[in-house]
Amino acid sequence: MKIELVSKNYNEGMRLVNVIEKKLGKLDKYFSGDADALVKLSTVGNDKFTMEITVRFGGYIARAEVTGSNMYDNIDLILPKLEKQIARFRDRMNSKMPKKALPLKVDVEEAAPREEYGNVVKEKHFDISIVTVDEAIAEMELLDHDFYVFVNAENNKVSVVYKRHDGDYGLITPEY
């Protein structure tokens, strides 16, 4: 697995880099082809550190993020999350796709009990408005929702604005 480290307001030492590479290397057992990992390290405030890992494999993405008091604890918290996501994905794909099309190694003896995703229990239809990003944020706050779907008045594309854990907002605009 190819690993890229990006730091923001955090100085990682060689010891931490070696620990991250060693522990992420354990995920190689899940991939038959090339996989890339992007590890983002950052400082939040004076005493909190965030680690975000995004793994790209076979056209798919697994991502996890954790904030804690030190990076060594963060790596131990984030790896089980990633491993669970990848294992669930593998199990789900095993039941839906022919084995030769899977981007992941499949080991029948190793497979954990199968966990299914939840079911769609509600479907909603709504009118979509053409507004600016600021107006969409205002509407989202008025509705007390975590996200808001709208047509961006600046580019006429369907977009989603959402609340981030750090109190800021994110904007998703698909390319099509």
Image (cartoon, grey):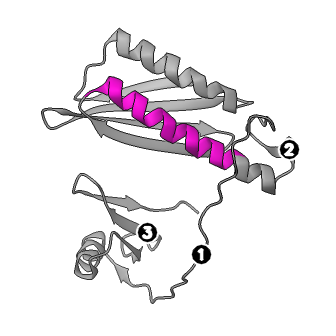
Which label number is shown at residue 99? 2
What x and y, as percent, mark residue 125? 51, 88
Q: Secondary structure at mark 2?
A: helix
Which label number is shown at residue 120? 1
What x and y, as percent, mark residue 82? 52, 39
Crowd around label 2: few <14 · some 14–19 · many ≥20 (10 Å): few
**Does the image show residue 1?**
no
How far apart marks 2 and 3 lie (CA) works out to 35 Å
Which label number is shown at residue 159? 3
What span is colored magenta in the figure? Answer: 70-90
Left or right, 171 with respect to 61, comes to left
Which residue type carries mark 1? Val
Left or right, 64 with respect to 42, comes to right
Give the vertical position of 34 relative to 12 (above or below): below
Furthest-left residue in this view: 46
Q: Is residue 153 magenta?
A: no
* Residue in front for this viewpoint, 125 or 68: 68
Magenta span main SS: helix
x 64%, y 48%: residue: 88
Crowd around label 3: few <14 · some 14–19 · many ≥20 (10 Å): some
What x and y, as percent, mark residue 122? 54, 82
Which residue type carries mark 3? Ser
For the N terminus, the image quarter is top right
- Closest to the camera, between mark 2 and mark 3, is 2
Which picture quadrant has residue 61? top right
x 87%, y 42%: residue: 100
Q: Are marks 2 and 3 in contact (CB under 8 Å)?
A: no
Q: Secondary structure at mark 3?
A: strand
